[in-house]
Image (tube, coloured by chain):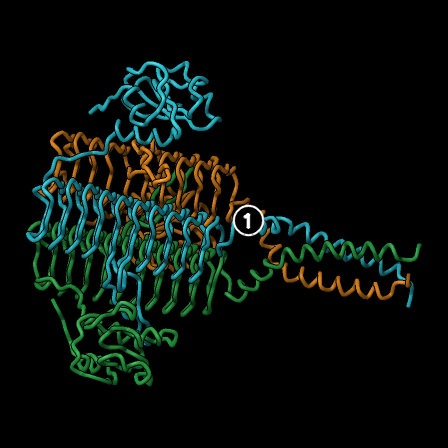
Chain colours: A green, B orange, C cyan
Amino acid sequence: MSHSKTAAELAAHVNGQLTGAGDTPIERVADLENAVAGEIAYVDNEKFFDLASNSDASCLLVPEGVAAKLGQNHPATIEVAHPKLAFSLIAEILHPPLRREPAIHETAVVATTADVALSAYLGPHVCVGEYARIGVNTRIEAGTVLGANVTIGADCVLHPNVVLYDGVSIGNGVILHAGVCIGADGFGYVRDRMGYYKFPQIGTVVIEDEVEIGAHTCIDRAALGRTRIGRGTKLDNMVHVGHNCDIGERVVIAAQTGISGSVTIEDDAVIGGQVGFGDHTRVQKGAIIGSKAGILPGKIVRPGVWWGIPVQPLDEYKRMNAHLGRLPQMRQEIKELKKALEEVRARLPQK
Amino acid sequence: MSHSKTAAELAAHVNGQLTGAGDTPIERVADLENAVAGEIAYVDNEKFFDLASNSDASCLLVPEGVAAKLGQNHPATIEVAHPKLAFSLIAEILHPPLRREPAIHETAVVATTADVALSAYLGPHVCVGEYARIGVNTRIEAGTVLGANVTIGADCVLHPNVVLYDGVSIGNGVILHAGVCIGADGFGYVRDRMGYYKFPQIGTVVIEDEVEIGAHTCIDRAALGRTRIGRGTKLDNMVHVGHNCDIGERVVIAAQTGISGSVTIEDDAVIGGQVGFGDHTRVQKGAIIGSKAGILPGKIVRPGVWWGIPVQPLDEYKRMNAHLGRLPQMRQEIKELKKALEEVRARLPQK
Amino acid sequence: MSHSKTAAELAAHVNGQLTGAGDTPIERVADLENAVAGEIAYVDNEKFFDLASNSDASCLLVPEGVAAKLGQNHPATIEVAHPKLAFSLIAEILHPPLRREPAIHETAVVATTADVALSAYLGPHVCVGEYARIGVNTRIEAGTVLGANVTIGADCVLHPNVVLYDGVSIGNGVILHAGVCIGADGFGYVRDRMGYYKFPQIGTVVIEDEVEIGAHTCIDRAALGRTRIGRGTKLDNMVHVGHNCDIGERVVIAAQTGISGSVTIEDDAVIGGQVGFGDHTRVQKGAIIGSKAGILPGKIVRPGVWWGIPVQPLDEYKRMNAHLGRLPQMRQEIKELKKALEEVRARLPQK
């Protein structure tokens, strides 16, 4: 299933400036080092210009103004403002995501009250609960289970063995990787002298458009109300999102980060991996939190770069680490001061 | 599926003192802020008394002695010793957990030697291994796989895509959320000059009554003997429990905590999220361990509150942090001491 | 299904020196404390010699030269160079892994273009994609989903609900525990002012021979190129391996460790649990990294033992901790120095 294009077609697609043979056929994207004839690669860092010059790619995507410098060995070169972005857009054409013919596999179990678009695909052993709704061109792979009253928009991909509990709502263009679990009960109990009683977990989860969620990430339903993942947000693998969290738009969260209940993360925040959030924390718009950071319950994280356990501004974290590094020297200085003081004392006039 | 009750019925259920109209119909629980007519909310903190006064809830659950203060705007008010607990008990009535008609779905694959209670529900594509036993009123959702000789008690709920390996034993009233995995091989190898040989992982796992386990949590089988989760214990999402662990009764463990092999956690301990336990540690009855703590192998954690990596009593942790905060000042003091000493030295009588 | 052997047969199997009755029948392995008649246990640590002497095991595996000391209470004793290894080898005979009769379950969905060995087993609701290949004696349990062009070698075990995305390649003798996910898209985006675009994730994953992967571990496909897990490597539960990682041979990685993209871990490294690796780090051959460590992006970890966040040699980490422990004393010393200096100053001759 080749989706071959010419260099000229690709240049036009990314609004780039072509140098060389516009009819060069391009079949795949590749990295500079491994690219061969028929492939397109990109370079956006001066450090790699030599590697680019020697690449066997048939076509190079390069920053504006550098084609002349790099392109002689390549049949074609395309100058663009943002080569990595252009590379991504070209990859979408050369390697389009899998499309499946509309179908409901004969082993799928679909409630008679469910509303499945005619253009949707339901793979083997998929289950669709009562009153669920599945939008146009959505693809649901084998073994995925949708509870009652689940709503899924158009153009979504649900990979195998995803589980959506009852009432969960998914927007358009959402990608859920294998094993994602959305809508399980939040972790809330009331302690009595006899033990723990379950606090009600009867809210829901709303996933907005263009969200992508990594394999095995779990997003709990709200106790009351809703848990939300905003438009265009991307979660990596094995992230935990507790009940009643509100994650904004275009937020990025790396793998294995854990978010306790009732946390708010505002738009455009960037969160590293293995970060831990105490409950009721708030991360303000555009804040950046380094991997493995820990945020105490109720904390407000302002814009800027944050680091450490508990989290502090990166500058302070670095300063503190510098101080720590000088501890051995400080001990030595105290020792010397003591000795010097003894010497001074010995030279004092007698009382 | 309304389960409407009157305020008087709910007051009786939680043994509370009703003020106002006993025939007020109540259909749902809600929080103070979002509650509307037909809903009941609770307040147990003076901070929220104003919010409670202005809530549109038809009925309020309040601490004893405060109804007069808060209730005028509400058709009904119920005084109870523990409003949050009463709220949870009322939620169970108004929002009872899903019940399914007893059935074995036609796509389920059940070994002929399995013993399934007539009142049990087995959903689509469920698999039940040889000699497995499933108790009365237990509900097993789609895609869940039970190995040979698995035993499950009465009144359990297994959500979709759970996996129980051969021989695992589950008590009564247990809830396993989606993707839970119980009984996989523990992580044990013997190193030889050639590489790693598998140490036998032929023990089992016992989950006692009233345990709830969050989505994607993994509990490994014992190498020899058994791994145990005690009665009434609650585990959050993506917790890892290694082989041969013994977790007591009414223990609470938050998300993404990892427990190495042969760890003992005694009754009533409370463990935060992303905590890591080295092997052969023991947590004594009632100890509380803060999120992200790290416990070195073999350590005994006594009752009290613990924090940090490696874990230390919270008081010491705070004291240490206070010392760290004073490091810049200490450096400054050392500098000044040096300077002052020089001045003193200059003023000494010549030898 | 007893696989009973005599003590003499077992001694021969591990090339050990038998003392006592060679015809003693042995049916199971057990630990020293719980062993009963018909069972074999091992001891390799002097601390447990008393426990061993009093064990009810019918046969003991002991280090060379200590049988006389321990064996009198036991029908048989076997001396070997490495008792724990011998014990593991004997467990393989007495408790052989489950074998299933070759079969394709009637509920499995297998593409007509797939190539499945006649001796393979495909359990209920297994899905096998177009052009997939499954080797001899491989066993694939219920609910596992294999994408198109997946290749699996001989003698593998895939436990229930595993997901292999398109094109993933698995060697011989590989064990994948329940819920393992291999080949999901890596976490790579290009940020534009509008939001995030997906960077292509069109590479693959190669798992070499004799690898074992714990429950729910996720290994992402390469963006371009491949992600690799080397021969004989063992991963625990819920490990995250990002795109384009290269993990060498005989590497051991404990539970919940997270590895960012493009990390290289060379042969024979040992990695603790909950460790976090920044992207493009390299761990050199044989390095040992303690649990909960954090490695900054681009860092090279040389051979030796490493600890802490950020990671440092264990010696330095311990020294730093010792310095930290002395902080209160240092403050006290500074205070005393100040006071002593005041006293000295008071005794100086007037200017």
Q: Is residue A26 left or right of residue C44?
A: left
Please, what secondary structure does the residue beneath circle 1 have? helix
Question: The numbered mark 1 sits on a residue in which chain?
Answer: C
Of the 4 image quadrants, the one containing the C terminus of chain B is bottom right
Q: Is residue C219 left or right of residue B278?
A: left
Q: Which residue is mark 1?
A: C315
Up/down of A136 relative to B188, above or below: below
Asked where in the image residue C26 lies, by quadrant, the reply is top left
Instruction: Estimate the x, y position of residue A268 in percent, counting from the top left.
Output: 37, 69
Give the residue displayed 31% in from the left and 65% down from the top: C188
Q: Nearer the viewer, residue B58 or B326?
A: B326
Give the residue displayed 74% in from the left and 56% down from the top: A336
Q: Amino acid at mark 1?
A: Asp
Counting every numbered tag in the picture gives 1
Q: Is residue B11 visible?
A: yes
Up/down of A217 relative to A77, above or below: above
Give the residue displayed 58% in from the left and 47% down from the top: B316
Instruction: Estimate the x, y position of residue C175 in percent, counting from the top left.
Output: 25, 43
Asked where in the image residue A94 lies, by quadrant, the reply is bottom left
Q: Nearer the viewer, residue B273 or A337?
A: A337
Q: Nearer the viewer, residue B253 or B292?
A: B292
Instruction: Estimate the x, y position of residue C168 in percent, counting from the top left.
Output: 21, 54
